[in-house]
Amino acid sequence: MKNILTLLILFCSINLYGQTTQTDSVKIEDDIYYAYKNAMRGVIWAIDNFPYKKEVTYKDIIIENRKICSIKIYRQEGGIKIISTGFHSSSSVEITTYKSFP
């Protein structure tokens, strides 16, 4: 009887541990997804608001006292290079893209 009770408690504790690690990995995936969306906001902002006279532009987008993305725009021959870093919680995602202008 004691052995069965011990096995039952062990099984339940392992099962609960597995469920908590799954929710942690889902939370990390959600944080990365939101950081990616914030980085894409920066890319879209950079394409819409590109200052043609400057060689380099730096911009931080802050919403509700939280920094959601940091943007660097470099003017290059034939277009621009955009580096956008999106943030969410403790995760960050960096997107580098090139946009050509005729």
Image (cartoon, grey):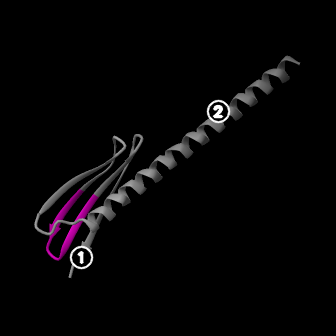
CA–CA distance between discs 1 and 2?
51 Å
Q: Residue furthest right?
A: 1
- Say if the magenta span includes residue 79: yes
What residue is drawn where x is 65% and y is 38%? 19
The quarter in which the N terminus is drawn is: top right
Helix, strand or loop for disc 2? helix
- Look at mark 2 in the image and give the residue it sits on: 17
- Along the line of sight, the residue nearer the viewer: 29 or 65: 65
The quarter in which the C terminus is drawn is: bottom left
Classify residue 54 by image quadrant.
bottom left
Q: Residue furthest front?
A: 64
Q: Position of residue 41 (x, y in %)?
A: 36, 59
What residue is drawn where x is 14% and y is 60%? 56
Looking at the image, residue 47 sits to the left or right of residue 32; the answer is left
What residue is drawn where x is 64% and y is 33%? 17
**Sequence-earlier tag: 1 or 2:** 2
**What label sits on residue 47 in the rendered view?**
none
Classify residue 66 by image quadrant.
top left
- Look at mark 1 in the image and give the residue it sits on: 100
The type of residue carrying mark 1 is: Ser
Looking at the image, residue 82 sits to the left or right of residue 92; the answer is left
Magenta span of residues: 72-83
- In the rendered view, would you say 55 is above or below 58? below
Q: Position of residue 44 (x, y in %)?
A: 33, 64
Q: Position of residue 39 (x, y in %)?
A: 36, 56
